[in-house]
Image (spheres, helix red, strand yellow):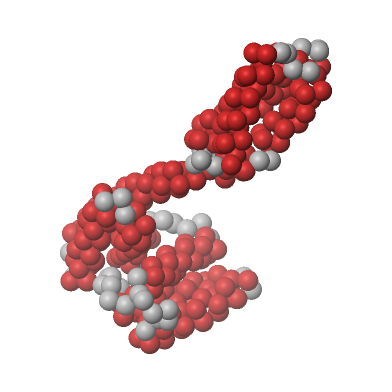
Amino acid sequence: MSVLSTWLRCGLIGLAMGSAIAAPALDQVERRLQSVATLIESSSAAKQIESSGEAPARERRDNARLIHREAAAAAARGDAAGASQLLDEAAREMMAGARLAKPEQVAAEKAKRDFAARLDSARALLAAQLRITQEKNAGREAQQATRTIEQQIGQAQQLAAQDRIDEARPLLDRAYLTARVSIETMRRGDTLVRSLHFASPREEYEYEIDRNDTHGMLIRVLLADRREAALPAAMQGPVDQAAKLRGEAEAQAKRGDHAGAIRLLEDSTRELVRAIRAGGLYIPG
């Protein structure tokens, strides 16, 4: 049991016993108003509730604030007994809120929700990737990407079923990014892309920036799976060249030459595709 919980429990027991004996003096109530205000606004329990992001915990804290204000009004009227009872209620609401915001429970529940959301996205992209592969009669690399995505999703689900979310999430992220990169690559030059009808070169530049970022994220996921900190030489060269081209593209865009920047970004992304393939992940290109 935490120090805070012990303090609150002992305080509530003591207050209950004190209430049975005699009504508290107003000066005691004033001191308790201050201590409960500290509990609600700046204690470790308050910080725990704030950081948890849990709506039910925040609601209990809001309840505690409201009850505390009522206690202050009762004290101002000279109703020490009524104020004391309200302060007990406010403290109980904060205890309830803190229990709902236990960091380990909140983190675990959020991780599961995030995993479920990413799983839905990965499945949707896998279905799209498979459909486009079949429609375009894509080659071996696209088909291999499909099998890789399916395997990664399956492995991630198995780990999640064993409550190993921390191990499952990187696998699922890789499946999601692989599917996205595969789809974008197969659509390059396709009527599906041309049908976007970019309103301006700047808008197409933003699209290419996002595409380049996606490939970069996939490389970071691949790197996270490796024990060594550095990229293999076969990946490092293309990654360095991609970064150089990306920098040149951004400089071109700042000068207003978005058409030139787009060409440089396409070259940069092609280098990232080379790096991804060198890392052992087959994607169409």
Residue under the image location 33 percent in, 60 percent down:
167
Left or right: 97 in relation to 279: right
Left or right: 2 in relation to 231: right
Residue under the image location 33 percent in, 67 percent down:
185
Q: Position of residue 269 (x, y in %)?
A: 41, 74
Residue under the image location 47 percent in, 83 percent down:
240
Left or right: 70 in relation to 151: right
Q: Position of residue 51 (x, y in %)?
A: 57, 45
Q: Quadrant of residue 175?
A: bottom left
Above or below, 164 relative to 48: below
Viewer-nearest residue: 140 or 197: 140
Above or below, 34 relative to 171: above
Viewer-nearest residue: 115 or 66: 66
Viewer-nearest residue: 184 or 260: 184
Task: Work out which quarter of the rendered image holds the C terminus and state it.
Answer: bottom left
Is residue 6 visible in this depiction of the protein?
A: yes
Viewer-nearest residue: 163 or 94: 94
